[in-house]
Image (spheres, rainbow, N blue to C red):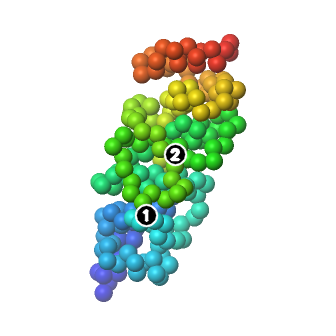
Amino acid sequence: MTNNRHSHKDTFERLYKIAEVQGGYFTTKQAEAAGFNQKNHGYHVRTGNWIRERRGIYRLAKFPPTERPDLMFWWLWSRNRDDVPQGVYSHETALSLYDLSDINPARLHMTVPRSFQRRNAPSKTPVLHRGSVHKDDIETRFGVKVTKALKTITDLLTTRTVQMDHMQQAVKQAFQRGLITRMELARNRRIPAAIKKEIEQLRGDQ
């Protein structure tokens, strides 16, 4: 009996460690890796230990609320068959996460691989931008992957989905706060020359 209790305690502790860095969220496969048999997942939902957010995604019921639970939920939603999240928050969402300009997008924006597929996606799914994001253009915020400020601004100047006065504000703030440096801009070979020139113009004399 004692060994059984220790085994259950260890299983819960392993799951908590996984969920702790994910805002209380975890996937079916992560629960299995922690030691929970998939046949018993429904039991933990019925007893109120877990909340089933969507197929394959759960949350610990007693985990303290986080500032942006939506970010972790949709990032886990973007996982592939190996349970690895594929999405990188980008465009308007990334801009707002850096608190650059005054925009407040109504929907989340995420860049996913061109091969990304999701059947029966919910109606409030993020706006998906298909393409590849270089590893050097990614950082972690709120526990999820986000395009760096320079990549974010480059993407938005390419798509032209944000008004230019907001873009100018974002560029100026990014340089002022050190999120972008002139050296970083000059050395980045992934940015078209025309976009580099436009960023310099928007930056102005600082």
Local SS, label 2: strand
**Amino acid type, residue under disc 1 in the picture:** Ile
Residue located at (44% from left, 31% from top): 137
Depicted 49 relative to depicted 83: above or below: below
Characterize the local packing of mark 2: few (<14), some (14-19) or many (20 or more) Cα atoms within 10 angstroms. some
Q: Quadrant of the C terminus?
A: top right
Residue pointed to by mark 1 = 57
- Figure quadrant of residue 57: bottom left
Contact (Cβ within 8 Å) of mark 2 with mark 1: no
Mark closest to the chain's N terminus, 2 or 1: 1
Mark yes or no: residue 148 visible.
yes
Rendered location of residue 95, percent (x, y): 59, 36
Depicted 163 relative to depicted 57: above or below: above
Local SS, label 1: strand
Residue located at (31% from left, 67% from top): 32
Q: Is residue 183 left or right of residue 119?
A: right
How far is disc 2 from disc 1 in space, using C-alphas? 20 Å
120 or 43: nearer the eye? 120
**Amino acid type, residue under disc 2 in the picture:** Val
Mark yes or no: residue 179 visible.
no
Depicted 81 relative to depicted 175: above or below: below
Query: Which numbered disc, 2 or 1, marks the residue closer to the eye?
Result: 2
Q: Quadrant of the N terminus?
A: bottom left
- Figure quadrant of residue 98: top right
- Give the number of the disc on residue 76: none
Residue located at (41% from left, 18% from top): 189
Residue pointed to by mark 2 = 127
